[in-house]
């Protein structure tokens, strides 16, 4: 004959263990989700910071370009000797001041020198290309900021027009010389 056990003393213990197991699983999932969310926010913050630094480098390069072009224009506006020259001589002198000569560094060298930048120049990457075309220079500036293995990069391409004659130099500003600006954002990962 079989004896039926009618003892319910341990049932509450099993029930409490099951409830604790469910609670531990729920808290572990919640904690894991919270940690992952924190890591994602921190990574997003770093990406934005790199992008803003890269953009700041490009903004500084653009400001230096405007400043340099203003100085070149001031030279031509204030130099009576230049005003007496023929149009072709003015055109060539303007080109030489942008390209650089033994007497001046030129725009490309000024922009490529990281010591001219205010932001942290150890992590800043600046690449400058200046190509001479028929009536203009094509200026390409890339600014990047690298921390760790990720590099955020932003680029600017623009044309710097070369005044063709004396009358085109009158009343012109540095902003008038820069045309067809194009911005491009990149992210590089190994």
Image (spheres, rainbow, N blue to C red):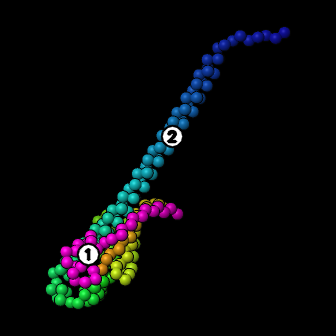
**Which residue corresponds to the image point at 27% horizontal and 89% vertical from the top-left?**
88
The N terminus, quarter of image: top right
Whole-percent x and y of residue 93? 27, 86
- On the image, the x and y values in percent for residue 37 come to 47, 43
Classed neighbour count for the residue bearing mark 2: other residues with Cα under 10 Å, few (<14), some (14–19), many (≥20): few
Q: Earlier in the sequence, mark 1 or mark 2?
A: 2
* Crowd rating for badge 1 (residues with CA inside 10 Å; few <14, some 14–19, many 20+): many
The residue shown at (30%, 66%) is: 60
Q: Which mark, by number, is residue 69?
A: 1
Count of marks, rendered view: 2
Residue tagged 2: 33
Under tag 2, what secondary structure?
A: helix
Q: Residue at x 33, y 71 (%)?
A: 179
Q: Position of residue 111 (x, y in %)?
A: 33, 73
Q: Secondary structure at mark 1?
A: helix
Q: Is residue 125 above or below residue 26?
A: below
Is residue 66 shown in magenta? no
Magenta region: which residues? 163-190
């Amino acid at each position: 004959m079989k004896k039926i056990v009618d003892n319910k003393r341990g049932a509450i213990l099993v029930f409490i263990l099951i409830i604790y197991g469910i609670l531990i699983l729920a808290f572990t999932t919640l904690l894991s989700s919270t940690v992952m969310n924190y890591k994602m926010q921190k990574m997003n913050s770093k990406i934005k910071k790199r992008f803003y630094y890269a953009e700041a480098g490009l903004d500084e390069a653009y400001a230096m370009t405007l400043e340099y072009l203003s100085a070149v224009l001031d030279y031509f506006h204030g130099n009576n000797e230049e005003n007496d020259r023929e149009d072709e001589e003015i055109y060539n002198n303007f080109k030489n001041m942008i390209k650089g000569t033994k007497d001046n560094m030129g725009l490309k060298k000024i922009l490529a020198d990281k010591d001219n930048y205010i932001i942290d120049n150890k992590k800043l990457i600046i690449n400058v290309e200046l190509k001479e075309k028929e009536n203009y220079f094509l200026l390409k500036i890339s600014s990047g900021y690298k921390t760790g293995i990720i590099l955020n990069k932003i680029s600017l391409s623009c044309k710097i027009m070369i005044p063709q004659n004396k009358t085109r130099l009158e009343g012109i500003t540095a902003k008038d010389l820069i045309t067809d600006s194009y911005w491009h954002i990149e992210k590089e990962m190994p």
